[in-house]
Amino acid sequence: MTTITQSTLSTGTEVVIEANPGVESVAAVWLVPAGVAHDPEDRFGLSALWAELLLRGTKNLDSRAQADAFDRLGTSRSVRVSSRFLTLGTTTLGTKLSDSLPLLVDMVRVPNFDDASIDPSRGLCLQAIEALKDDPGERAALGVRARHLAPPFNRSTLGTTDGLNALTPADIRDCWPRMAVPTGSIIALAGHVDPRAVVEQLEALLSDWTGTHPEPVPSAEPPRSYAHEVDDSNQVQIVLMHDAPPESSEKTMLERLAVSVLSGGMSSRLFTEVREKRALCYSVHAGYATDRDFGLVAASVGTQPERAQESLDVLVAEMQRLSTPEGRVTPEEFSRAVVGMKASLIFSGESTGARASALATDMFRLARPRSLEEIAAEVDAITLDQLNAYLATRSLGRVTIQTVGPEPLNPPI
Amino acid sequence: MTTITQSTLSTGTEVVIEANPGVESVAAVWLVPAGVAHDPEDRFGLSALWAELLLRGTKNLDSRAQADAFDRLGTSRSVRVSSRFLTLGTTTLGTKLSDSLPLLVDMVRVPNFDDASIDPSRGLCLQAIEALKDDPGERAALGVRARHLAPPFNRSTLGTTDGLNALTPADIRDCWPRMAVPTGSIIALAGHVDPRAVVEQLEALLSDWTGTHPEPVPSAEPPRSYAHEVDDSNQVQIVLMHDAPPESSEKTMLERLAVSVLSGGMSSRLFTEVREKRALCYSVHAGYATDRDFGLVAASVGTQPERAQESLDVLVAEMQRLSTPEGRVTPEEFSRAVVGMKASLIFSGESTGARASALATDMFRLARPRSLEEIAAEVDAITLDQLNAYLATRSLGRVTIQTVGPEPLNPPI
């Protein structure tokens, strides 16, 4: 039996903990409000460079000693850049958590950012951008995002070559304490953990942490519509993006069920119509992602040039058909979507990493954590009639389509 | 507390089950001795095509009805090709297992292989081969395997374009019952499961299953050595492969610890020397894979042309240094490797999918399943002196190196 506790440290950081005595591992996720949307206008890539540098030592332990210290505990760690946040993650045994937390806190509070580490880290960031040239699928995903969302939420988490090259050691060191602040930071833990002991330890480790900074706000209107990037390869990558409810909306679970009907399993419409009936592609998928303030559905197809136009046509037709009388969700589809979503919830409950991530994002998007039981109840509360009524009024709105391949396609929408 | 039971069905199939009352999910893995090593000489790709077709209906349920039936239970399924086996996998809730097993058994026993499914499936298999043109990393991995291992273990699991195009409906249908046989089949389950009920159900479902066929045997001596594939991209992919103990060897755990020192975490030698100190690459990794009869270590680097030669030189130097007096594993490295391996074992115990896979491969490679506690005890039994004594006598032997990139490199070995 799991129990969730939520507290706010005296410094303003939210801490949410799901204790699960049935497991030995514990996962920690720390959202630091220093994602790419916060990068200075002429320095895109600062957050990507921080993500490398945070793994390379603190004022207390140089890069090598830090790696040794984590590995000595059997604690794995990661840093990931997203739009709003730098997300630090660790996984360890419950018995090693109290030794791991000070190391994690030092990564955020006293990173080293020493001269010797900066250029190698910058080099790796530049290589990651360079590697995009050989990854048309990722370029399509970045392209659709760049034109669908308003700045600064449309930025690539990799940064830009110019931005990375422009960054000085002073930028890197001076901006960090302004961005890595307690207000807006969220720490979530799940697994074998004593909530009270962890909160006390974090309170002690973070008591002198101060600072706040404004959230990013959407600026210009995004262009959206269709764009093609010529790529002389044997594949065509297609991505379509449309708006969807933010997490806080009462329509979120309806949208989630709709996307599950579209792409939730091998009996889903996209898999059946695009991949299986027509063998148009080797991959097809639609996913629904939410922010606190907005949401989006991204549908992608990887295919070959001679199948690309039909793939796009069928993809769009299936997405539109959901909202037509002929395309109403059937009782069987509805039942499968509900069963699939509830099974996925239960499976996620068996992964401490998945639970810690879900709790942290719940805290940001909803300002409160949800138990798996609560989410399952939200799914159960929805009826087929509600879903079809929602879909009947739903429109894809101003969509964005990005293709990467030898020839442009004719967007049917 | 988990308990492992092992039984042999009357038809000869091995069944191994780890019951874990602490979880709700159950994963099933079925190794069918029909991997690419069994493909007819002029029909490489038969197993890849089967893997597609097994997901497209049985004599009892057509493709769509089969997908509906699995999704109705919330059961996800997969089919994967490896050298020796086609591996079918399902994940579901323990409460849905008894309804899922007949569907899984039908996939193996009475697949449909109907004409209407064959060409679309063949098309997807051909597309997967075509997509290799845009995936230099995968081409390097296939290239090193093709030259390091003896036929038929050196084959690509994708098959070949010629082989796939040569396959007739009769090949596809007639070969399956000869290959999908109970002798050599292994079924493993882990999670929320009643072992006795499952064995009874499988016994009933499989009682009339018969057949056996010979195992593949290594034929010609592999060429190994260095090869380069010219690829006009911005990356260089480097893979080095050397022999290592098979799973049954008493040296296996020693090799596993050695590879962990080399590549087991951020404090590992390859990560430190290649990636962090020199920023030579964006990815570097070494992994140890075992078969019942052989083992291999594959080390790979993804880098840019101007860093490629130094990357390869440092990679080889670090791999050789492990066996020199100066390169002896230190007590700190040893301790970190042991802690890391034991933590990974515990984490794997929290994934029913990982446990089912491990039990199935144990049954094939060792002819018995091991509990996590037994494996942890094997790790604990090893001393630093034993590890260094092993490494002092270990040689990389005849290695294989494959590079893919603009220019060939000078292999230092």
Image (cartoon, coloured by chain):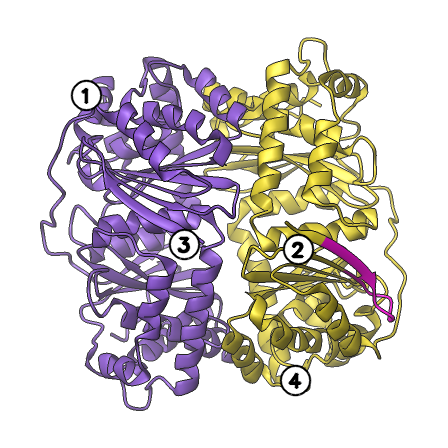
Chain colours: A yellow, B purple
Q: Label 2 is placed on what type of residue?
A: Ala
Describe the element under mark 2 as helix, strand or loop: helix
Of marks 2 and 1, the one in the foreground: 2
Describe the element under mark 3 as helix, strand or loop: helix
User: Mark number for residue A115?
Assistant: 4
At 33% from the left and 86% from the top, the residue drawn is B327
Relative side of B27 to B297, left or right = right
Percent across and percent down for residue A379 are: 71, 31
Give the letter of the chain under mark 1.
Answer: B
Percent across and percent down for residue B232 are: 42, 54
Q: Residues within 10 Å of mark 3 (few under 14, many from 20)?
A: many
Q: Are marks 3 and 1 in contact (CB under 8 Å)?
A: no
Relative side of B30 to A62, left or right = left
- To which quarter of the image does residue A150 belong? top right
Q: Residue furthest toward the top?
A: A326
From the viewer's perspective, is residue A273 above or below residue B282? Answer: above
User: Mark number for residue B174?
Assistant: 1
